[in-house]
Image: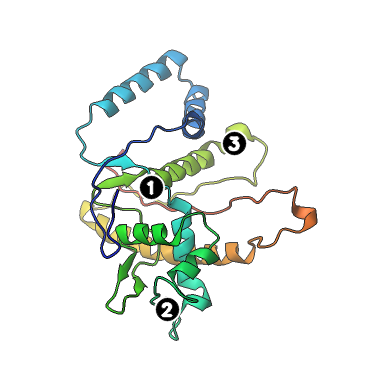
């Protein structure tokens, strides 16, 4: 797969990577368990699964699902670029950065302590139009959050992680019935909205949601464990966060 670093490019070749069963089970097992405990019989569940597989294999969609292996790393890079004083200009906005140097895309990626290389990170940020190259041979952050939308394909990793997180939040009490301080989900919706207002609503929620997410990131940064003390080495770090998604469906 070759991608120009000057502009986002279309995917030249679709590579379908098999999904490891343990990863798939993180999504499938809680859903099946939830349905089974709600009264679905094993026969019904098997029939639904077979039907879903038949529908998936016969779809005519031109959008492919591919593996990008860049989900969490991209979010970390964008968040640091937005908020780290070392990468902001005099007006407090994300500064334009060269590829290499003391204060550059390379130093930014290294400061995030991610596994992806600076070059690969930049290629992906360009591909999803989060960053663009400017005349000064520098790179400008043009979006306030990592958006994995692409015209030609659906990236697997970030969307799979979202589905797993949402499933865990919805089914957590089946595994931990007495724990009220674990995962949760909240919803605000209304089924009497005019269809023509959909675009305005989703735009409104996205902008307000970004402000809320930046507050969450501030809290997480303040509590991030940067140095592990000897007494804490046996206590693994925990992933905490909040997910936000828009709802736009027909009346149900």
Whole-number angstrom distance, CA of label 2 to CA of label 3: 42 Å
* Residue 202: % across, % down: 31, 57
> Farthest bottom residue?
90
Q: Are marks 2 and 3 in contact (CB under 8 Å)?
A: no
Label 3 crowd (10 A; few <14 / some 14-19 / many >=20)? some
Q: Secondary structure at mark 3?
A: helix
Q: Secondary structure at mark 1?
A: loop
> Farthest right residue?
231
Q: Give the number of the disc on residue 116.
A: none
Here the colouring is: rainbow
* Number of numbered labels in the structure image: 3
Question: Can you identify the residue that label 3 sits on?
Answer: 173
Which residue is located at x 49 percent, y 72 percent?
A: 83
Mark 2 or mark 1, whichever is nearer to me: 1
Question: Can you identify the residue that label 2 sits on?
Answer: 93
Mark sitting earlier along the chain (2/1): 1
Note whether 225 is above or below 34 in the view shown.
below
Question: Can you identify the residue that label 1 sits on?
Answer: 68
Q: Secondary structure at mark 2?
A: loop
Quadrant location of residue 49? Answer: top left
Quadrant assignment for the C terminus? top left
Q: Is residue 80 visible?
A: no
Which residue is located at x 72 percent, y 58 percent?
A: 228
* Residue 116: % across, % down: 47, 55
Using the image as rendered, state which of residue 5 and residue 165 is in the foreground.
5
Which residue is located at x 46 percent, y 78 percent?
A: 88
Whole-number angstrom distance, CA of label 3 to CA of label 1: 32 Å
Mark 2 or mark 3, whichever is nearer to me: 2
Mark 3 or mark 1, whichever is nearer to me: 1
* Residue 10: % across, % down: 23, 52
Label 1 crowd (10 A; few <14 / some 14-19 / many >=20)? few
Q: Is residue 52 visible?
A: yes
């Amino acid at each position: 797969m070759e991608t120009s670093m000057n502009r986002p490019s279309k995917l030249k070749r679709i590579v379908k990577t098999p999904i490891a069963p343990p990863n798939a089970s993180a999504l499938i097992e809680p859903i099946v368990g939830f349905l089974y405990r709600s009264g679905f019989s094993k026969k019904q569940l098997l029939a639904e699964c077979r039907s879903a597989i038949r529908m998936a294999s016969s779809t005519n969609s031109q959008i492919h699902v591919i593996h990008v292996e860049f989900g969490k790393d991209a979010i970390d890079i964008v968040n640091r670029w937005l908020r780290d004083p070392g990468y902001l200009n005099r007006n407090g906005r994300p500064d334009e950065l060269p590829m290499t140097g003391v204060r550059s895309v390379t130093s930014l990626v290294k400061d995030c302590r991610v596994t992806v290389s600076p070059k690969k990170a930049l290629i992906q940020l360009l591909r999803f139009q989060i960053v663009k190259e400017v005349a000064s041979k520098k790179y400008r952050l043009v979006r306030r959050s990592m958006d994995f939308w692409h015209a030609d394909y659906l990236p697997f990793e970030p969307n799979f992680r979202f589905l797993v997180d949402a499933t865990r939040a919805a089914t957590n009490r089946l595994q931990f019935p007495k724990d009220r301080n674990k995962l949760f989900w909240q919803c605000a919706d209304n089924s009497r909205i005019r269809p023509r207002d959909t675009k305005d609503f989703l735009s409104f929620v996205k902008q307000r949601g970004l402000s809320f997410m930046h507050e969450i990131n501030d809290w997480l940064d303040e509590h991030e464990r940067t140095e592990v003390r000897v007494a804490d080495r046996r206590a693994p770090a925990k992933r905490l966060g909040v997910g936000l998604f828009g709802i736009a469906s027909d009346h149900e």
